[in-house]
Image (cartoon, helix red, strand yellow):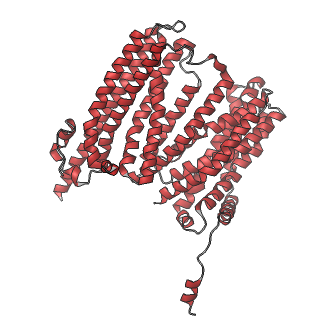
């Protein structure tokens, strides 16, 4: 057979969710590790702003104990939000995103992979660092544990919501401010349940209800939002 | 502050907001019409 | 009659023009009735005195703000599903009116809070939810207008509206939860027991706001249609009669 017939006889490339997911997560992690500036920026911002609050409100231990979980959560929100543009913007600008849409792998697969990679370099470092910042505010061990658990469950939701907003705003005028306006209101339930979990623990109550609600949010977000992100990316590329 | 002040401020703001919206609707209409006229002037110039 | 008959811009333009004035008239009549019931029929409250009468604008505005977001999201969903331009234009037309009602709810809530609870801003569940809702509206409007291509703005905003409307109950629930944990029920707008006249007053005012919202959206969508369809023949042929066509809706016939 000649070459053309051989090529025509080859089966079409088959994509799978898993293959797309692992490809995307590996790629984005590699890129992030080659340019660690972005990750370090997120971490530095988190630590910096959390350290600014006591300077602003005074170092009264009682006050810091009360505001600690909330402040750390707000800082986590802002830091997570800061890293959002890097999720799609670079790939959109140089045309890689269009190529990825054409790949045989189902779109929710590699989109989820990108979001997972984003969480690994933004949400995860924040979660790991939160106990240190919590100590700055004088929080107890049980509270620190609740705070870290809440962040561990909540920051993926932030990444998912943020990814949807980031995809919607691709190529839009208004840049970062527009993204803030879109994302921060949607972050509110995560903030409420996440900070609430740590505050409940600090008050001696169980943090289980908050963490359960946060977990429910995480499940719903993981099931539903990747499809919304895919739709948003398709809208952006039309 | 008498309670009447608060009632007036609430309903007054609502009335002003409605009036502002109606004015904005008129202005939007006028702008759309102006744009159509401009388009047609440009056309006739071609 | 085929439903899609009305999804053609020139047809809907004429229909909206004919219907809008009637909705405004209805709104005025219902508002007059509602304010009469609210200020004349409903009795003075034992606890709050006269100032509770703010409820007749605060609660209907809050209801409308949430209802309109839902309707806006539905129009957006329709525009994505059926790929109709007009549905997206309706969504855009509703947004500013929805934001206005949210603002009225917030403002009247503040002026109700001051004499009753001592401060203008009260972090209760409704006020906080309304504040978040205001930002959701701003986000929708900003996103819709953030692109060169208006169709891109239509679709992005429509998707945002869907995400927002799914989130809205979650946000409301989470804020309720947060509020009951932090402040208990001492600070609440539900202090009074509902006299039947109060309920009627709120319902009439809510209907009035709804009719007004429909009227305003219909008027606004006509401007949106004109701007977006400016290059089409039927808009051009409105010509010098355009101003007349709009000043006297339903009177002038559009060219066939």
**Position in image of residue C155 (x %, y %):** 45, 51
**Position in image of residue A139 (x %, y %):** 80, 32
Identity of the residue furthest to the right in this view: A141
**Position in image of residue A54 (x %, y %):** 71, 30
In the picture shown, does residue C141 fall above or below C27? below
At 60% from the left edge and 79% from the top edge, which residue is drawn?
Answer: A11
- Give whichever of C227, C87 is nearer the camera: C87
- Give whichever of A160, A78 is nearer the camera: A160
At 50% from the left edge and 16% from the top edge, which residue is drawn?
Answer: C112
* B1 left or right of C250 in image: right
At 71% from the left edge and 29% from the top edge, which residue is drawn?
Answer: A67
In the picture shown, does residue A51 fall above or below A129? above
**Position in image of residue A107 (x %, y %):** 58, 61
Could one spot residue C173 in this view of the protein? Answer: yes
Q: Quadrant of residue A211?
A: top right
Could one spot residue A45 in this view of the protein? Answer: no
Q: How many numbered marks appear?
A: 0
In the picture shown, does residue C75 fall above or below A28? above
At 34% from the left edge and 18% from the top edge, which residue is drawn?
Answer: C32
- Give whichever of A127, C20 is nearer the camera: C20
Q: Quadrant of residue A190?
A: top right
Identity of the residue furthest to the bottom in this view: A1
* C195 left or right of C217 in image: right
* A195 left or right of C158 in image: right
């Amino acid at each position: 057979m000649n070459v053309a017939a051989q090529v025509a006889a080859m089966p079409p490339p088959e994509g799978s969710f898993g293959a797309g997911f692992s490809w995307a997560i590996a790629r984005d992690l590699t890129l992030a590790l080659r340019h660690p500036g972005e990750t370090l920026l997120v971490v530095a911002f988190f630590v910096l702003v959390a350290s600014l609050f006591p300077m602003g409100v005074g170092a009264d231990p009682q006050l810091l104990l009360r505001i600690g979980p909330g402040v750390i959560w707000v800082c986590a929100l802002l830091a997570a939000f800061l890293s959002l543009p890097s999720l799609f913007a670079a790939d959109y600008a140089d045309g890689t995103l269009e190529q990825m849409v054409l790949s045989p792998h189902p779109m929710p697969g590699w989109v989820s992979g990108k979001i997972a990679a984003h969480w690994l370099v933004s949400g995860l470092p924040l979660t790991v660092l939160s106990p240190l910042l919590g100590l700055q505010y004088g929080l107890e061990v049980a509270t620190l544990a609740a705070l870290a658990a809440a962040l561990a469950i909540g920051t993926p939701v932030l990444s998912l919501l943020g990814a949807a907003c980031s995809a919607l705003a691709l190529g839009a005028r208004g840049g970062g401010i527009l993204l803030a306006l879109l994302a921060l209101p949607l972050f509110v339930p995560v903030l409420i349940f996440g900070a609430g979990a740590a505050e409940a623990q600090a008050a001696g109550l169980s943090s289980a209800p908050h963490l359960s609600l946060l977990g429910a949010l995480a499940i719903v977000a993981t099931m539903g939002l990747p499809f919304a992100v895919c739709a948003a990316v398709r809208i952006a590329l039309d | 502050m008498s309670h009447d002040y608060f009632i007036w401020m609430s309903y007054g703001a609502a009335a002003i907001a409605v009036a502002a919206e109606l004015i904005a609707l008129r202005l939007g209409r006028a702008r759309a019409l102006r744009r159509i006229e401009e388009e047609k002037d440009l056309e006739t110039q071609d | 009659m085929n439903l899609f008959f009305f999804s053609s811009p020139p047809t809907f333009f004429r229909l909206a023009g004919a219907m809008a004035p009637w909705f405004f008239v209805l709104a005025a009549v219902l508002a007059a009735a509602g304010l009469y019931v609210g200020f004349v029929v409903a009795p003075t409250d034992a606890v709050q005195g006269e100032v509770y009468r703010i409820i007749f604008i605060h609660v209907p505005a809050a209801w409308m703000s949430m209802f309109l977001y839902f309707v806006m999201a539905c129009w957006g969903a329709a525009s994505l599903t059926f790929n109709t331009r007009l549905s997206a234009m309706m969504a855009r037309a509703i947004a500013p009116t929805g934001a206005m009602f949210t603002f009225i709810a917030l403002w009247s809530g503040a002026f109700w809070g001051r004499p009753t609870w001592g401060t203008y801003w009260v972090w209760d569940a409704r006020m906080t939810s309304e504040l978040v809702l205001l930002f959701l509206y701003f986000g929708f409007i900003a996103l819709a207008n953030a692109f060169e291509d208006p169709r891109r703005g239509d679709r992005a905003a429509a998707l945002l509206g869907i995400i927002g409307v799914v989130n809205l109950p979650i946000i409301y629930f989470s804020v309720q939860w947060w509020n009951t944990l932090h402040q208990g029920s001492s600070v609440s707008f539900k202090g009074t027991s509902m006299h039947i006249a109060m309920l009627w007053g709120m319902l009439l005012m809510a209907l009035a706001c709804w009719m007004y919202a429909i009227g305003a959206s219909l008027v606004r969508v006509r401007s949106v249609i004109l701007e977006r369809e400016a290059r089409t023949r039927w808009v051009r042929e409105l010509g010098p009669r355009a101003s007349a066509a709009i000043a006297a809706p339903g009177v002038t016939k559009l060219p066939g």
